[in-house]
Amino acid sequence: TQLLEQSPQFLSIQEGENLTVYCNSSSVFSSLQWYRQEPGEGPVLLVTVVTGGEVKKLKRLTFQFGDARKDSSLHITAAQPGDTGLYLCAGASFNKFYFGSGTKLNVKP
Amino acid sequence: KAGVTQTPRYLIKTRGQQVTLSCSPISGHRSVSWYQQTPGQGLQFLFEYFSETQRNKGNFPGRFSGRQFSNSRSEMNVSTLELGDSALYLCASSLREVYGYTFGSGTRLTVV
């Protein structure tokens, strides 16, 4: 079983739609990151959140860290085909790093 | 500043051979981690090195090994290659885990 559970696993939407990806755990993390990966490339760090309840915005992307630092969400407004990729959440806890299983997003033009 | 550099980018090996992959982290990053990524299993943690010491290890057989040099550069070695070792091998470096990791572009290993 994964320490970090992501949902949904797959998401196929039309350009312009909004979406939310969730990352949940029963464990507490000192920080949580979101990455985006394109095929054949390494994941690219999008954001790091460290404070419970923290909300960060990156253009059309909004990231939230749960109050108890056990979960996080990524919301994309008005998705574009360029948002297509694999979204991974990852958490740091006691010098260890855990990745979620990923959400594969496809935005159709 | 330069990112994480992995070499080679692509590699084709035969079953039974061994392979060594190289990773140069971002300057100043002392933590280097290795991951195996396959379509079926996702991102699987191999091991992490910090200041030349293996700090964490994933659930991989002993055929997978690694090391880190005094300049933080790291290598991983896979001996007696199996078809199932075909994957994208990713290296990532970090200043501190809490800040997240910077990944290289990976080495695509194909075992035939």
Image: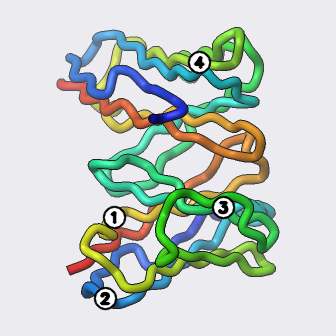
Q: Which chain carries label 4?
A: A
Is label 2 or label 3 in front? 2
Disc 4 crowd rating (10 Å Cα; few below 14, some 14-19, many 20+) is many
Which sits in the foreground, B94 or A24?
A24
Disc 2 crowd rating (10 Å Cα; few below 14, some 14-19, many 20+) is some
**Is residue B53 visible to us here?**
yes
User: Which image quadrant is residue B68 in?
Assistant: bottom right
**Circle nearer the N terminus (2, 3):** 2
Q: Which element carries disc 2, helix, strand or loop?
A: loop
Note whether B42 is above or below B90 in the view shown. above
Where does residue A41 sit, x and y in percent of width and height? Answer: 40, 55
Q: How far apart are marks 2 and 3 (CA)?
A: 25 Å
Q: Which element carries disc 1, helix, strand or loop?
A: strand
Q: Do the residues labelled 1 and 2 touch (CB within 8 Å)?
A: no
Q: Which mark is residue B48?
A: 3
Q: How far apart are marks 4 and 2 (CA)?
A: 43 Å
Q: Residue A71 carries which label?
A: 4
Q: Which element carries disc 4, helix, strand or loop?
A: strand
* Residue hosting label 1: B87
Same chain for the residues under marks 4 and 3 in the image: no
Same chain for the residues under marks 2 and 3 in the image: yes
Q: Which amino acid does label 1 sit on?
A: Ala
Where does residue B60 sit, x and y in percent of width and height? Answer: 48, 64
Name the residue located 70 percent from the left edge and 28 percent from the top edge. A29
Q: Which amino acid does label 2 sit on?
A: Gly
Q: Are marks 2 and 3 in contact (CB under 8 Å)?
A: no
Note whether B60 is above or below A57 in the view shown. below
Q: How far apart are marks 4 and 3 (CA)?
A: 24 Å
Q: Distance between the residues labelled 1 and 2?
A: 16 Å
* Residue hosting label 2: B16
Q: In which quarter of the image is the N terminus of chain A?
A: top left
